[in-house]
Amino acid sequence: MPYSLARHPFPPAVRRLQLAARTVLAVAGGDAYVRLRLVESSPGELAGFVAPGGGDHVRVVVGSPDGGPIALDDSGAPIGEARTETVVDHSVDEGWIDLDVLVHGEPGSELGVIGACAARAPLGSPAVMMGPKGSVVMSGAPGEVVLAGDDSALPAVRRYLRMLGPNVTGHLLLETRFDLAALEVEPPAGLRVRILEPGGAPSTGLIAALESVPSAVDPLQRFVFACGEQSLVAAARATLAGWGIDVERAVVKGYWKR
């Protein structure tokens, strides 16, 4: 029986949280992966929260790096630019959610919407979280997988590996300088792993590696996850078409754009 993917929309929700802990997981080339634990600012903020899919993500708005407040509009929604982050783990009963944030830039001069707060905001600093908007849930088990991504996709790759289990076979293609063990990415023995050195135009090496994977014996049994810089999307979809795989049976997304 071939695996299937079902897309489930979720009602919108705005949840008020605060920073409870941070852990620097790994540093590579001036970037760092930092795990943030956010907890409920009041009991019940995470009530009804679900994230059953491997790539489920939320949008997060933070205040200033010194822990300043977050402005809200009349409806209670945050005012400010949001950063999208993959859900690493969570417990509704205990009232927490973990996010692994990719921080660019040297300490003290972090870049991006959330980088400085992720690196050095004091514990207790506020955060507002929205989503997930929906989830892509897999039923059954694919005969093989092709998982491809850059640094931005590593948290989702980790979740998929854990969901797929130790007996999964196929290909794992990663464009990264990070130590996978430090990020808790543990490829099963049945995956052929290829690590690509970042450099040059984004996704160039990842696209070539993806195109070099042989066609599937049974396209209905191959699950493909290919996420990273936006230029990966069109190439990945073309590769899927060449393999005879409907894009609706895969997860292909641009997580960022150069």
Image (tube, rainbow, N blue to C red):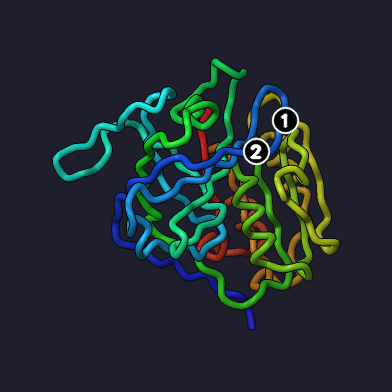
User: Front-most of 72 and 4?
Assistant: 72
Which residue is at a point 77% across and 54% down the rendered structure image?
186
Count of numbered circles on the image: 2
Q: Badge 2: how crowded within 10 Å, few (<14), some, or many (20+)? A: some
User: Front-most of 40 and 134?
Assistant: 40
Mark 2 and mark 1 in contact (Cβ < 8 Å)?
yes
Rendered view: 71 above or below 193: above
For this orientation, the residue located farthest to the left is: 74
Which residue is at a point 68% across and 22% down the rendered structure image?
30
- Residue 201 position within the rendered picture, expressed as x and y whole percent measured from the top left: 65, 26
Task: Name the residue tied to disc 2.
Answer: 151
Indicate left or right for 1 with 61 as reference: right
User: Front-most of 223 and 23?
Assistant: 23
Rendered view: 59 above or below 51: above
For this orientation, the residue located farthest to the bottom is: 1
Amino acid, disc 2:
Asp
- Residue 224 position within the rendered picture, expressed as x and y whole percent measured from the top left: 64, 59
Indicate left or right for 79 with 50 as reference: left
Amino acid, disc 1:
Pro
- Residue 87 position within the rendered picture, expressed as x and y whole percent measured from the top left: 52, 52
Say which mark, if any, is on residue 172.
none
Q: Badge 1: how crowded within 10 Å, few (<14), some, or many (20+)? A: some
Which residue is at a point 65% across and 27% down the rendered structure image?
31
- Residue 202 position within the rendered picture, expressed as x and y whole percent measured from the top left: 63, 31
Which residue is at a point 56% across and 76% down the rendered structure image?
139
SS at badge 1: loop
Indicate left or right for 39 with 145 as reference: left
Q: Depth-wise, is mark 1 or mark 2 nearer the camera?
A: 2
- The quarter of the picture where the N terminus appears is bottom right
Q: How far apart are marks 1 and 2 (CA)?
A: 9 Å
**Quick one: label 1 or label 2, which is nearer the N terminus?**
2
Task: Name the residue tied to disc 1.
Answer: 198
